[in-house]
Image (cartoon, coloured by chain):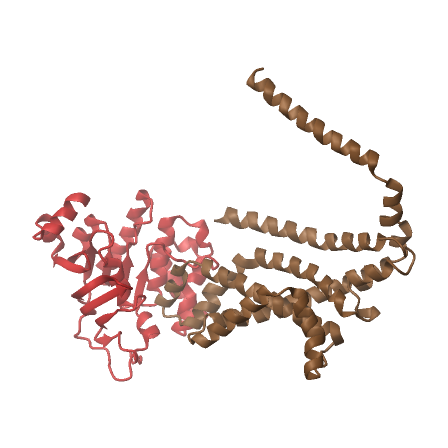
Amino acid sequence: MTRRARERALTLSLYAVFLAIVVVFVLLADWEAISENFFLAEGFTGTWRSMILVAAKNTILYTIVAFVGGFVLAMVLVLMKLAPIPPFRWLATAYIELFRGLPALVVILFMGFGVPIAFGWRPPGGVVGAGLVALMMVAGAYMAETIRAGIEAVPKGQAEAARSLGMNGSWTMASIVMPQALRIVIPPLTNELVILLKDTSLLFVLGMAASQQELTVAARNFMSTGPSAGTATSLVFAALLYLAITLPLTQLVAWMERKQKRSR
Amino acid sequence: MGEQLHPTQTIDERAPAIEVRDLHKSFGDNEVLTGIDFTVDHGTVVCVVGPSGSGKSTLLRCVNRLEEPTSGQILVEGIDITDPDTELDRVRSRIGMVFQQFNLFPHMTVLRNLTIAQQRVKRRGRAEAEKIARANLEKVGLAEKVDAYPAHLSGGQQQRVAIARALSMDPDMMLFDEPTSALDPELVGDVLDVMRALARDGMTMMVVTHEMGFAREVGDKLVFMDGGVIVEEGDPTEVLANPQHERTQAFLSKVL
């Protein structure tokens, strides 16, 4: 066989294998079970109000609250890392390492149950408020590392040029280094936002009032009550809603990264 | 000027623009400058040449303390800038610096690059700062680029903007750190022309460079450095035509 014929034969056989897999899947899959358990029509038509107007709305709200709080905390941690006095730097490093090293679920349980019991703390917004504080604390640690990396990615010459013009350290940081660093970290911070959105599902362990339910809790409830009870349709619904938010965001990140690469 | 640069020391009009006394600088165990003494007089152009790693850029960067000297003294117009009481930011605003990599602020327009330090450091109003900025852009031949961003300029244009940015602070002297080394050969000329014009106007300049032609034509003094010391200094034409020291001869035979 010529080299070309061999390549063509290989391509054809790969397509044949792919086709065989599809055929086997279609023949073996229990389509009735799939449509009845995962795609029950009433499960969508009968629950969309609570799923979208309450649960999806809460998921987005929790994500934004945790992200903004986490960002503010991250900025404080970054400034501590840049502090001239070593104890501040140690403290920030210890915090970041601790909260990046723990599972988010453990922190959520700790803030939701441990701390309120130990100190009689009544978190604003109840146990969900405590859970949001936990998400902020974890997100802040990750974002601090991201922002610090962004600052280090700004060429040293930028700060030197500003200092050589007589600008002091704080002005240089605020108007020369930070604006460039934040531009660099917008894509990774958006990834952070996607991760945070998914992590709001962990609040599920805290138990919450009907009006506070986010997507995962709502989906779990609709598995046992409501029009699609006894099926997993509500989980599929929740999954589709998560994807409807996360996919555009990840596409946005990809687009921004391509754009940044081009402008260099 | 009445500007407070140091609690006790004041500008001495008779002192040299820059005076370096027994300057040492180490990075860890690596001693880059091993006892430098030299002066730059007002209104003169001093060119510093030498092989890479000779410490010439480090010396220049010590003069506005972008590098912290390990020991020794640096007097700028008679004020010791190695003294911790010196108002370093104010001294720096009187010393223009031009970098090899231009270091324009990429997130700002050309105009903003030229006004930000004027407004923040010199406390000039916006209108005044913009007027001065436009005049300096005119001087470097880039008046039409006020609203451009640095990324849209050629290297030579960026470097001329960088010079205009330094000039907008009304500096008493200018430091140039290999200002044409990162430029394509056809763009070097425009930058050197701007520097030549500055020298003609009487600006005090210290220039680390590989442009021997510029050093001969514009320089009042040539300093040759190697291995962290000044090997030889003197009139540029003299030193270039008739180097006394063996190391100077070896270097010049390679670059000329």
User: Taking A46 as reference, is B20 left or right?
Assistant: left
Q: Quadrant of residue A167?
A: bottom left
Q: Can residue B240 be seen in this view?
A: no
Q: Where is residue B147 in the image (x, y as percent from the top left)?
A: 47, 56
Q: Look at the image and tell me whether residue B117 can be seen.
A: yes
Q: Which residue is drawn at 71% across and 73% down?
A: A112
Measured from the top left, where is residue B114 in percent x and y? Answer: 40, 63
The chain drawn in red is B
Quarter where residue A27 is shown: top right
- Above or below, B5 relative to B138: below
Image coords of residue A24 (percent x, y) = 79, 33
Name the image quarter holding residue B206: bottom left
The image shows residue B118, relative to residue B87, as above or below, that is above
Q: Using the image as rendered, state which of residue A186 and residue B218 is in the foreground.
A: A186
Q: Is residue B125 shown above or below B225?
A: below
Residue at 68% across, 65% down: A105
Q: Which residue lies furthest to the top in this view?
A: A1
- A241 vs A1, left or right, is right
Task: Give the position of the N terminus of chain A as an image quadrant.
Answer: top right
What color is chain A drawn in?
brown
Q: How many labels does the image show?
A: 0
Which residue occupies the foreground of this view, A27 or B21?
Answer: A27
> Residue B44 in the image: x percent, y percent?
18, 62
